[in-house]
Amino acid sequence: MADDWEGPGSWQELKEHWPRVIEAIATTEERRDALDIAFSSLAAAHPRACMPKVSEILHDIPSIHVIGFGKASHIMLSELVRHYNGNIERGIINCPISGNIGNVVLNKASHPHPDIPGRKGAEAMMELVEGLSENDILVCLISGGGSAMLPFPRSGIELDHAAKLAKELMEAGADIHELNAVRRAISQVKGGRLAFHSGPAKVINLIISDVIGNHMEDIASGPTVHDPGRIHASDVLDKFQIEPTEPIRVAVESYSPLSNDELPSITNIILADNLTAVDAGVERARKLGYEPIKYWPLEGEAQKQAGKFVESGNCVIGGGETTVHVKGGGKGGRNQEFVLAAVVELEGTLLSIGTDGIDGNSQSAGAIADTSTKRLLDPGQYMEINDSNGYFNKVGGLVNTGPTGTNVSDVAIFLSD
């Protein structure tokens, strides 16, 4: 594989694919503008835009070891190779594809449901970091999706049981902080434990964050950062009335965060986050002649937040991560549900997408609707069974971006005359 990765998620592919996205669903000028603004948001958070900073961050470091995890980690690695002039000794990353970039192995790991290859990759990372010395520099490429793509449950916990628990929490409406508190408690690598095993080596975390507010312990559940213990996993299970397997219950009750003194020297650098995308969208909207209002953070239950969002102004650019309480067996995700919830009262154009190109259990990034959408099909029955994807598949509002190469949570755009 070439060092300059040009496959799914690459900057080149995103640029070439976006005109086809516009052609498929931009039936009005407002829709075209919303998609234009969305592209600017994605471009600002893409590794091609934010990874050049590594030339300054690593400029005086002659050699490094590399690990990584998340949906954008292979694109980050390609850009690291482009901009870092030193030697990459060896490395392994868990990412959406398999192969090699230089001396770094690309290990294909699953998302959102963890798999055995992902676990084997986590074990390989553990072996790598345990062999480092005080003279070594470990660079960690971290992006959204890393929690599921770096599975290594504590002894006695089955991988399938850990995955089932995460799914139950998400469907019950747990937010990312609650979900990842549980993930840390049942993992051998999360909650700083991967960094702990790197011993005296210096750790540099290069991060594309999908966590609103950039709580370090929640980005990929924090394998290489300190866990301040803000949320107790046992409280989360009690809140959502979930009774896990006995090994998981024991792990949760016995979990104790590592102290800062137990961890090596760690440097955290946020290269891009949700605000990076939102601010770029606001800037692009101004250039298109709008007077945008920034709505951040966008949080809470998707069905309840949509109305508030579109009532905030004639041009609203927002970002965040809503939740969905799954009541039916439909297909979709929080972005499609967010747009669907606004359809009946919508006066204008509303778009919402996951910046990674995947929304929930669908293959779409999100959805777009306008004033005319409600005349095409009544959304009521689709809302009842959480089948937002089915609704927008029929009315023609699905936004199908494919892999975008980044992951900074969600971006929403509302435009009206």
Image (tube, rainbow, N blue to C red):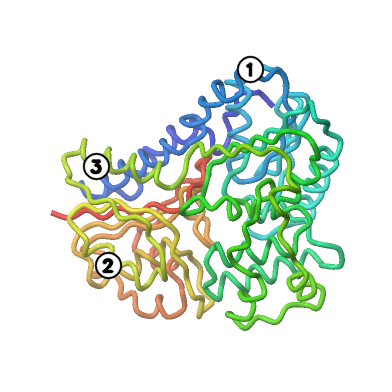
Return the disc, 2 or 3, that comes first in the chain's sequence: 3
Residue closer to the observer: 408 or 275: 275
Q: Is residue 7 above or below residue 256?
A: above
In x, y percent, where is residue 178?
58, 67
The residue that label 3 is drawn on is 285
Neighbours of disc 1 within 10 Å: few (<14), some (14-19), many (20+):
few
Q: CA distance from mark 1 to mark 2?
A: 49 Å
Q: Which residue is rendered at x = 55% and y = 62% of the image? A: 176
Q: CA distance from mark 2 to mark 3?
A: 20 Å
* Disc marking residue 308: 2
The residue that label 1 is drawn on is 60
Tag 1 near tag 3, CB within 8 Å: no
- Give amino acid for label 2: Lys
Q: Is residue 315 above or below residue 393?
A: above
Quarter of the rendering containing residue 180? bottom right
Quarter of the rendering containing residue 295? bottom left
Q: Which residue is rendered at x = 42% and y = 71% of the image? A: 301
Return the disc, 1 or 3, that comes first in the chain's sequence: 1
Neighbours of disc 2 within 10 Å: few (<14), some (14-19), many (20+):
few
Residue closer to the observer: 57 or 319: 57
- Give amino acid for label 1: Asp
Q: CA distance from mark 1 to mark 3?
A: 39 Å
Q: Residue furthest left?
A: 417
Return the disc, 1 or 2, that comes first in the chain's sequence: 1
Residue closer to the observer: 263 or 146: 263
* Disc marking residue 131: none
- Give amino acid for label 3: Ala
